[in-house]
Amino acid sequence: MFPRRVKVLTDSFQGNFEREVIKTDYFIFQKKVVIDNLISTNGGNVLIAADELVLNAPIDTRVYMRMTPDYWVVPPGGDGVNFASLFFSMQQGLPLDGLKSFDSLYLWRDFYDSKRKMFIYGETTRPKGKQVAEMPQLPSGQVPLASDKAYGSNYTDLRPTDGSDAPVSDVIWPEVRSGTIRIYASKISLCDECKKALESRMGQLASTKSDPFDENQAVFLQASGLKGGRGAAGSSYYFLGKALSGMQGGLSGSPGRGGDAGSVEIHYVNQQPTVEEEDLIRSASSLEGGAPAQSHRQRTPRGSLQIPPGVVSQIPPPARQDKGLLV
């Protein structure tokens, strides 16, 4: 294992993702190689040379971005007027239904389920303090502050704010490309449970909460591109109360493009694979370019935010990015 620190976001990036990640290159040389646990390279490359390779778990060469707690814009002051509505709720100890709804957007990611032998989607835990949430997705815009410009004398006159677009220009694109998996072997096989997972994976939408292009997948050579970042959700109204029960919040920004896929190279040594073996490797590999996170701009609903933002208008989604190469 050879770790290296790599910058993936520019110095000018102001959001809640760390600008650097640790990529790890793996070099494995032995007669029989058995992968029993997930190998995640965080964008690093894998080279395996063996007489036999047995995949009981995946090799994943995607970059996992590190998200810090504040997916909302941190308020500049403490005078009670410039606070974002979410932050205001936290300061006042009010019910955090609003925060939970935003969690369902910003903490949604895929992860490997070793029992099901699949990458599935779900909501991770919100990080606190110096913790981070790692996810194979590019940075999203932060929930903006509710407007502090008073159009009248009441909280109800402080209008919500539209979200910004995903921070595409701050991504260092060559560095978020997934890594290469290169294998030299005479025989490559998958466990029986892995084959069953492959047979059942097709067309499985992640859940009713999913983004448009999310699918649960059984993948054992995972080099697909990163999912694109979200346009920031619009803010709610400054004050979360019954007086705003019919009022709508801000409009979300546009999503960003996905990342480029890596590649998978299979070199059979001293023998040619059967058609069945080739088909198995192809079905076990994922080399799609990254899809955008959203297909619509969405508007944050009323103050209590007990439901996720609703669809407002369809936008032309960014195209999927470069596919990887399977050779």
Image (spheres, helix red, strand yellow):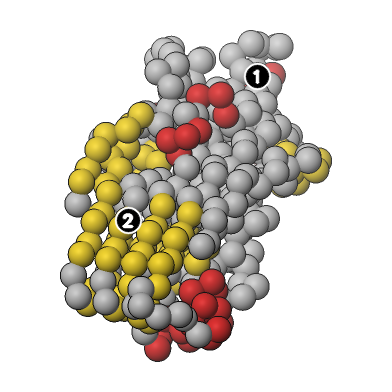
Residue pictured at 50% horizontal, 40% vertical: 138
Q: Please, what secondary structure does the residue beneath circle 1 have?
A: loop
Q: Nearer the viewer, residue 126 or 96?
A: 126
- Relative height, residue 228 to residue 201 (above, below): above
Q: Which residue is mark 2?
A: 46
- Relative height, residue 249 to residue 107 (above, below): above
Q: Please, what secondary structure does the residue beneath circle 2 have?
A: strand
Q: CA distance from mark 2 to mark 1?
A: 53 Å
Asked whether residue 115 is in view, the answer is no
- Mark 1: few, some, or many residues within 10 Å (few <14, many ≥20)? some
Residue pictured at 54% horizontal, 42% vertical: 259
Residue pictured at 62% horizontal, 36% vertical: 256
Callout 1, which amino acid?
Leu
Q: Nearer the viewer, residue 226 or 315?
A: 226
Q: Which residue is mark 1?
A: 158
Q: In the rendering, at what x and y percent does residue 184 appear? A: 34, 67
**Lateral position of residue 44 relative to residue 108, left or right:** left
| Number of numbered markers | 2
Q: In the rendering, at what x and y percent does residue 268 appear? A: 40, 73
Q: Nearer the viewer, residue 320 or 28?
A: 28
Asked whether residue 283 is in view, the answer is yes
